[in-house]
Image: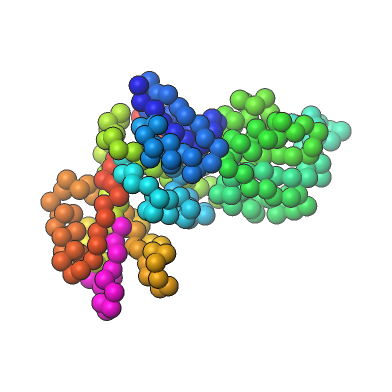
């Protein structure tokens, strides 16, 4: 049986795992914080971890990216792109006015994961500017905390699944600030992923430039450009070794099994760059069959 570590049941991390392994017998191991998710697989207690890595509104999740680069050696085996729809969750009976509708003035605190909270800031400023905002380890943990603190005026931002699991109401649906809000999850682990097939493949690279080499980044990008290899993401992260030293994370829309990509990597290494392959993997979206 496959074992998968992820954030608590009812979170988008949990939904990502269940989508990727639909129809497969899986032992899900739930953890409150992302560090424990990573370590569960790094220590060999689970086969895979599900990691939220990027969001349309909030950008890359830097903490999770740094863990993937610096703390663990877990190859990326698949990615899942999910339309992240956040909801306001709580006990309606305690928070409603005489008309039975939600009374925002009764809300004193909003809890959620910081990424989910960032996706809803305009909504919160408009409707609940008086409420305290508190970050917790996951959206599902936020819903659980609200459930365990009745008559407190607390609400959570999270998924409908978590609301159902905890016996709470969806007070407002779709409270994200933008309709095109997607979250990208990575499946990481030592075992190759073979539970689903996809026609889209990506390869993630970590490039370290040589010091005192003017134009090195330009040459790196040129190695992809003249081969007409499309890059879906490029961003920098500090190496944490010296001020001004950065890694470059590059996502390539091509499998490592192609002819062009290995030759591009060889060219990059020939100019003195270090190229670490973080994974070559299938990419899935939520609406795929």
Q: Is residue 208 magenta?
A: yes
Q: Is residue 273 magenta?
A: no
Q: Residue at x 87, y 33 (%)?
A: 98
Q: Residue at x 19, y 63 (%)?
A: 269
Residue 178 point in image, percent of width and height: 55, 50
Residue 140 point in image, percent of width and height: 59, 35
270 over 47 or under it: above or below: below
Q: Which quadrant holds residue 161? A: top right
Look at the image and tell me whether residue 78 can be seen: no
Residue 54 point in image, percent of width and height: 45, 50
Q: Residue at x 70, y 35 (%)?
A: 146
Q: Residue at x 28, y 68 (%)?
A: 209
Look at the image and tell me whether residue 210 can be seen: yes
Q: Residue reaching furthest front?
A: 43
* Magenta segment: 206-219
Residue 262 point in image, percent of width and height: 16, 54
174 with respect to 66 (left or right): right
Q: Which colouring convention does the figure follow?
A: rainbow
214 with respect to 3 (left or right): left
210 with respect to 90 (left or right): left
Q: Which quadrant holds residue 166? A: top right
How many marks on residues? 0
Q: Quadrant of the C terminus?
A: top left
113 with respect to 215 (left or right): right
Which of the pair 70/127 is nearer the observer? 70
75 over 223 or under it: above or below: above
């Amino acid at each position: 049986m496959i074992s998968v570590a992820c954030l608590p049941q009812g979170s988008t991390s949990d939904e990502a795992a269940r989508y990727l392994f639909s129809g497969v017998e899986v032992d899900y191991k739930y953890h409150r914080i992302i560090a424990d998710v990573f370590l569960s697989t790094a220590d060999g207690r689970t086969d895979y971890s599900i990691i939220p890595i990027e969001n349309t509104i909030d950008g890359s999740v830097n903490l999770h990216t740094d863990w993937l680069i610096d703390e663990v050696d877990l190859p990326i085996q698949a990615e899942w792109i999910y339309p992240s729809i956040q909801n306001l969750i709580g006990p309606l009976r305690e928070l409603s006015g005489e008309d039975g509708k939600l009374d925002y003035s009764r809300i004193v605190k909003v809890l959620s994961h910081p990424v989910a909270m960032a996706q809803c800031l305009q909504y919160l400023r408009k409707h609940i500017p008086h409420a305290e905002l508190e970050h917790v380890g996951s959206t599902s943990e936020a819903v659980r905390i609200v459930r365990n603190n009745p008559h407190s005026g607390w609400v959570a931002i999270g998924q409908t699944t978590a609301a159902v699991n905890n016996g709470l109401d969806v007070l407002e649906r779709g409270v994200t600030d933008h309709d095109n809000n997607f979250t990208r999850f990575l499946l990481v682990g030592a075992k190759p992923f073979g539970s689903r097939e996809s026609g889209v493949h990506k390869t993630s690279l970590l490039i370290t430039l040589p010091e005192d080499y003017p134009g090195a980044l330009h040459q790196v990008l040129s190695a992809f450009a003249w081969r007409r290899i499309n890059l879906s993401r490029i961003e920098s992260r500090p190496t944490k070794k010296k001020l001004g030293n950065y890694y470059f994370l590059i996502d390539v829309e091509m499998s490592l099994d192609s002819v062009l990509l290995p030759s591009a990597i060889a060219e990059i290494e020939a100019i003195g760059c270090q190229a670490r392959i973080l994974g070559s993997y299938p990419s899935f979206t939520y609406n795929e069959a």
